[in-house]
Image: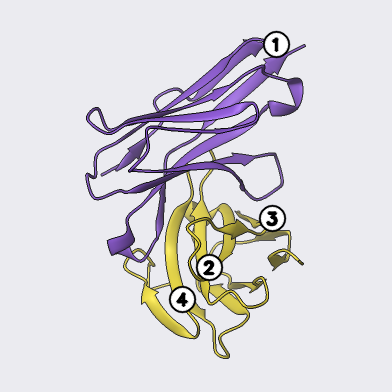
């Protein structure tokens, strides 16, 4: 039972354009959401997060949007850069679950120069 | 601050052999996690420690996997005997009190042949 899903395994975008990565979840108890970025042969690194009391959080070129009614969140990267090419994981947490993170399957982003 | 240290980085073993992985979390982080990431999938939680106690090991295949964190600092994960389907990257992560996000190590890539 996948509680967090990333339905697009890969995404290709031209440098300078917007990248939009999507994530859906099924567990209504999730109240905190995070995006991690992973380069080959490295562990995932934290990128940006959002609490369920917000619908948007912005950090530089990265913005995360949360639609609780649709149980959907998205990560926007503007403008996209070749260095953004990586695998992006969406993760969700519930305070009642001891803050264990449940991850989606990841989306591989390729930004072409 | 130093990151999460893991060793070895790579390991190749034959099926039915034993293997052990080591993790040293960020100093002061009470919570430690072991995740398994199979190629093309998101990380899946194997076990969560709080200091030297187990919080959640519901997804740990206990017939072959074991983990310990005896002094509440570093941790070892063991597989005995290994199966082909255990081929994956094993990620260790730690989390500080009051933080939602984890810091991951670089992982150990295990190949079972």
Distance (Cα) linking label 1 and label 4:
43 Å
Labelled pair 1, 2 in contact (Cβ < 8 Å)? no
Residue corresponding to mark 1: A16
Q: Earlier in the sequence, mark 2 or mark 3?
A: 2
Left or right: where B48 falls relative to A11: left
Residue placed most toward the observer, A109 or A81: A81
Q: Which chain is yellow?
A: B
Q: Which mark is residue B106?
A: 3
Asked if A12 appears above or below B106 in the picture, the reply is: above
B68 w.r.t. B22: above or below: below
Residue drawn at 70 percent across, 48 percent down: A42
**Chain letter, purple in picture:** A
Look at discs 2 and 3 and give the one toward the viewer.
3
Q: Nearer the viewer, residue B108 or A66?
A: A66
Q: Is A22 or A68 nearer to us in this picture? A: A68
- Dots 4 and 2 on the same chain: yes
Q: Where is residue A100? Give x, y as percent.
A: 40, 60
Q: Which residue is mark 4?
A: B49
User: Which chain contains the residue that carries disc 3?
Assistant: B
User: Which x, y percent locates residue A9?
Assistant: 48, 25
Q: Picture quarter containing residue B91?
A: bottom right
Asked whether disc 2 touches disc 3, contact meaning CB atoms under 8 Å apart, the reply is no
C-alpha span from label 1 to label 2: 50 Å
């Amino acid at each position: 039972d996948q509680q967090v899903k990333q339905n697009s395994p890969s995404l290709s975008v031209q440098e300078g354009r917007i990248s939009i990565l999507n994530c859906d979840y099924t567990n209504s108890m999730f109240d905190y959401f995070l995006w991690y970025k992973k380069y080959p042969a490295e562990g995932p690194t934290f990128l940006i997060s959002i609490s369920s009391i917000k619908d948007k959080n912005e950090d530089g070129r990265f913005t995360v949007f949360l639609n609780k009614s649709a149980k959907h969140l998205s990560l926007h990267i503007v403008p996209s850069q070749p260095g953004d090419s990586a695998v992006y994981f969406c993760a969700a947490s519930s305070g009642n679950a001891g803050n264990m993170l449940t991850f989606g399957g990841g989306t591989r982003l390729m930004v072409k120069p | 601050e130093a990151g999460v240290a893991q060793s070895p980085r790579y390991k190749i073993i034959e099926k039915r052999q034993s293997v052990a992985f080591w993790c040293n979390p960020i100093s002061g982080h009470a919570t430690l996690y072991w995740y398994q990431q199979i190629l093309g999938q998101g990380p899946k939680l194997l076990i969560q420690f709080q200091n030297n106690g187990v919080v959640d090991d519901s997804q740990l295949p206990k017939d072959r996997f074991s983990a310990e964190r005896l002094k509440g600092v570093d941790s070892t994960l063991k597989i005995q005997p290994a199966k082909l389907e255990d081929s994956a990257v094993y990620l260790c992560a730690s989390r500080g009190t009051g933080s939602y996000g984890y810091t991951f190590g670089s992982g150990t890539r295990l190949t079972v042949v």
